[in-house]
Image (tube, helix red, strand yellow):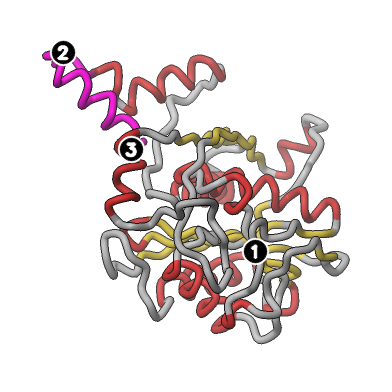
């Protein structure tokens, strides 16, 4: 993660040149050892779309028969480097992030770790596992617009959304809600709403959890996936925390209250990361 740069910097300043203990491969080995996995695993580094991209890759591996089971783990932490980086971009809100609010002024950084065990349905039923949800489709894209800014025309996220719907064999009417990336920055939230309106003909319940827990960066996709699965189970989506007055683009889509979702509907989740990396999942 980006936090490794802080550790690397401190060791170099102290004249400690052996940085092997900070490498991602060593971290992966430790996690694999703790989890007791047979495979050595792999690291997916796709900025704030990392977790969703990892889920997409895991599902593709299961679907093509390469494996029956994948443990997906995501984590990220707030470090001096991370905080100063967002600060230099003037992307931080002085108080708390207000996703999709007309007065939003930036994001709030947060920390998280999460894991999800993905299995083929046949393997899960064979082991009598409780199935809490299903990843029905996935789509990835890169708009290659800017190192830190999304494409204003939303082309990349639109493509990712179309890919995930095609992958899931779903259409507009099947989608009951959208779990948005919703960072609270002016450009991200506008870009997402533009993409949603381009892909979906009717207004959908849209929410973002980042006003409540902050932007957990590389871990955000997995945290949001777990919450979206809970929303499907409960039949309702959470409110967008810190939303006071919706931006004109988001009116009728976002809400300060919980909202019921139609029975038997499925959900869409989106993430957008630095480098123009976009990820979308269809969950059921």
For marks 3 and 1 on the same chain, the one whose residue lies earlier in the sequence: 3
In the rendering, at what x and y percent does residue 24 appear? Answer: 33, 28
In the rendering, at what x and y percent does residue 126 appear? Answer: 78, 33
Q: Nearer the viewer, residue 208 or 279?
A: 208
Pointer 1 local density, CA inside 10 Å: few below 14, some 14–19, many at least 20: many
- Which residue is at the far front? 94
* Segment tinted magenta in the rendering: 1-19
For marks 1 and 2 on the same chain, the one whose residue lies earlier in the sequence: 2
Q: Nearer the viewer, residue 166 or 206?
A: 206
For marks 3 and 2 on the same chain, the one whose residue lies earlier in the sequence: 3
**Image quadrant assignment for residue 187:** bottom left
Residue 135, visible in the rendered structure? yes
In the rendering, at what x and y percent does residue 100 appear? Answer: 57, 68
Pointer 2 local density, CA inside 10 Å: few below 14, some 14–19, many at least 20: few
Calculate the distance from the C-alpha at mark 3 to the C-alpha at mark 2. Answer: 19 Å
- Which residue is at the far right? 263
Mark nearest the camera among 3 and 1 is 1
* Cβ atoms under marks 1 and 2 closer than 8 Å: no
- Which residue is at the far bottom? 201
Q: Which mark is residue 16?
A: 2
Q: Which mark is residue 243?
A: 1
Pointer 3 local density, CA inside 10 Å: few below 14, some 14–19, many at least 20: some
* Residue drawn at point x = 29 percent, y = 67 percent: 144
Residue occupied by mark 3? 2
Q: Nearer the viewer, residue 137 or 121?
A: 137
Q: Is residue 233 above or below residue 239?
A: above
* Residue drawn at point x = 42 percent, y = 35 percent: 78
In the image: residue 111, left or right of residue 238: left
């Amino acid at each position: 993660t980006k936090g490794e740069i802080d550790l690397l910097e401190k060791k170099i300043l102290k004249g400690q040149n052996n940085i092997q203990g900070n490498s991602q491969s060593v971290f992966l080995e430790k996690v694999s050892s703790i989890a007791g996995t047979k495979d050595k695993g792999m690291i997916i580094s796709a900025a704030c779309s990392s977790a969703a991209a990892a889920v997409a890759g895991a599902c593709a591996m299961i679907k093509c028969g390469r494996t029956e089971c994948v443990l997906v783990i995501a984590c990220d932490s707030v470090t001096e480097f991370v905080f100063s980086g967002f600060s230099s971009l003037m992307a931080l809100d002085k108080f708390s992030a207000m996703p999709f609010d007309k007065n939003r002024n930036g994001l709030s950084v947060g920390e998280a770790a999460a894991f999800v065990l993905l299995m083929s349905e046949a393997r899960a039923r064979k082991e009598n596992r409780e199935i809490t949800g299903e990843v029905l489709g996935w789509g990835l894209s890169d708009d290659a617009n800017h190192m830190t800014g999304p494409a204003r025309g939303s082309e990349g996220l639109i493509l990712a959304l179309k890919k995930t719907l095609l992958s899931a064999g779903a259409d507009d009417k099947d989608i009951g809600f959208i779990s948005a990336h919703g960072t609270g920055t002016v450009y991200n939230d506008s870009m997402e709403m533009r993409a949603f309106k381009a892909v979906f003909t009717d207004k959908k319940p849209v929410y973002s959890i980042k006003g409540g827990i902050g932007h957990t960066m590389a871990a955000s996709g997995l945290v949001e996936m777990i919450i979206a699965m809970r929303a499907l189970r409960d039949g309702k989506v959470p409110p967008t925390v810190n939303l006071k007055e919706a931006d004109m683009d988001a009116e009728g889509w976002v809400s300060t209250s919980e909202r019921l979702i139609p029975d038997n509907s499925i959900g869409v989740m989106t993430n957008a990361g630095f480098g123009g990396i976009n990820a979308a999942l269809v969950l059921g």
